[in-house]
Image (spheres, helix red, strand yellow):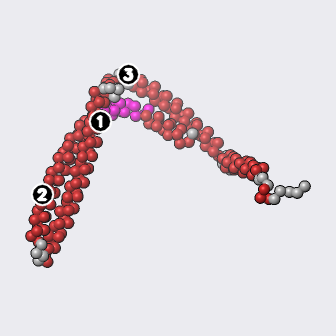
């Protein structure tokens, strides 16, 4: 029986066998890298699990101490209650803060635009001033005309300066209003953090270990 020409023979089976072999090789490489060559990773994982367990127990004790500590702390209770009210959904504080934030962002855009226009006008003025000074030094007859154009550019630059100043004043006012909302929250949070500092520190440490190593 004559064999088919090589170009007409199917290579599906050889390719399938080679693919299986390659897959098994890759799986073994992964196993060898993670288990055979790095047996210490198991001990590392166990170490961090123990660390997380210890931090969790420390956190439980800190939370119990906090609960006992704040029983008679009226400043903590009042700050907690007031901040909860400020941040409750639909509160006047949140609505005012959201409006102040939007106004601040809008004024920031206005200031950036006004500053850009002023800088363009200033660049045109400085370029013209250079031409005027050069014409004056060289006795160029176009000096008078250039000087008049420079004066006109100076007026336009002054106008852009005033627009930029108004935009800056509006930006400063909007920023001040927004900071009033944020400062009110910050003052209350500082009272709360005075009591909850240890608890939050332990929470952050435990969560950091879990996120990074486990």
**155 in relation to 142, above or below:** above
Residue in view at x 69 percent, y 49 percent: 26
Which region shows up in magenta? 185-199
Residue 199 image offset from top left, x and y in percent: 44, 32
User: How many numbered discs?
Assistant: 3
**Inter-mark Cα distance, 1 to 2:** 41 Å
Residue in view at x 52 percent, y 30 percent: 57
- Per the image, the residue denoted by label 1 is 182
Q: 209 or 30: which is nearer to us?
A: 30
For marks 1 and 2 on the same chain, the one whose residue lies earlier in the sequence: 2
For marks 2 and 3 on the same chain, the one whose residue lies earlier in the sequence: 3
Report if the CB atoms under discs 1 and 3 are less than 8 Å apart: no
Q: Say what secondary structure mark 2 lies in.
A: helix
Q: Quadrant of the N terminus?
A: bottom right
**Inter-mark Cα distance, 2 to 3:** 68 Å
Residue 36 visible? The answer is no
Which is more foreground, mark 2 or mark 3? 2
Which is more foreground, mark 1 or mark 2? 2
Q: Is residue 19 left or right of residue 186?
A: right
Residue in view at x 86 percent, y 57 percent: 3
Residue 51 image offset from top left, x and y in percent: 55, 37
- Per the image, the residue denoted by label 2 is 155
**85 in relation to 157, above or below:** above
Residue 139 image offset from top left, x and y in percent: 11, 77
Q: Say what secondary structure mark 1 lies in.
A: helix
- Per the image, the residue denoted by label 3 is 71
């Amino acid at each position: 029986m004559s064999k088919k020409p090589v170009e007409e023979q199917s290579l599906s089976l050889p390719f399938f066998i080679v693919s299986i072999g390659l897959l098994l090789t890759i799986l073994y490489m992964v196993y060898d890298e993670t288990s055979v060559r790095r047996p210490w990773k198991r001990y590392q994982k166990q170490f961090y699990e123990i660390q997380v367990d210890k931090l969790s127990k420390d956190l439980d004790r800190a939370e119990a101490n906090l609960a006992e500590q704040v029983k008679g702390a009226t400043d903590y209770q009042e700050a907690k209650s007031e901040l909860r009210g400020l941040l409750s959904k639909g509160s006047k504080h949140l609505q005012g803060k959201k409006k102040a934030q939007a106004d601040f962002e809008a004024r920031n855009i206005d200031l950036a635009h006004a500053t850009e226009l002023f800088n363009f006008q200033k660049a045109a003025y400085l370029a013209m001033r250079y031409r005027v000074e050069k014409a004056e030094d060289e006795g160029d007859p176009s000096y008078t005309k250039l000087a008049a154009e420079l004066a006109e550019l100076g007026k336009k630059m002054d106008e852009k300066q005033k627009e930029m100043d108004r935009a800056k004043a509006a930006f400063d006012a909007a920023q001040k209003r927004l900071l009033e909302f944020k400062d009110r929250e910050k003052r209350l949070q500082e009272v709360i953090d005075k009591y909850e500092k240890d608890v939050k520190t332990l929470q952050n440490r435990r969560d950091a270990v879990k996120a990074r190593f486990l």
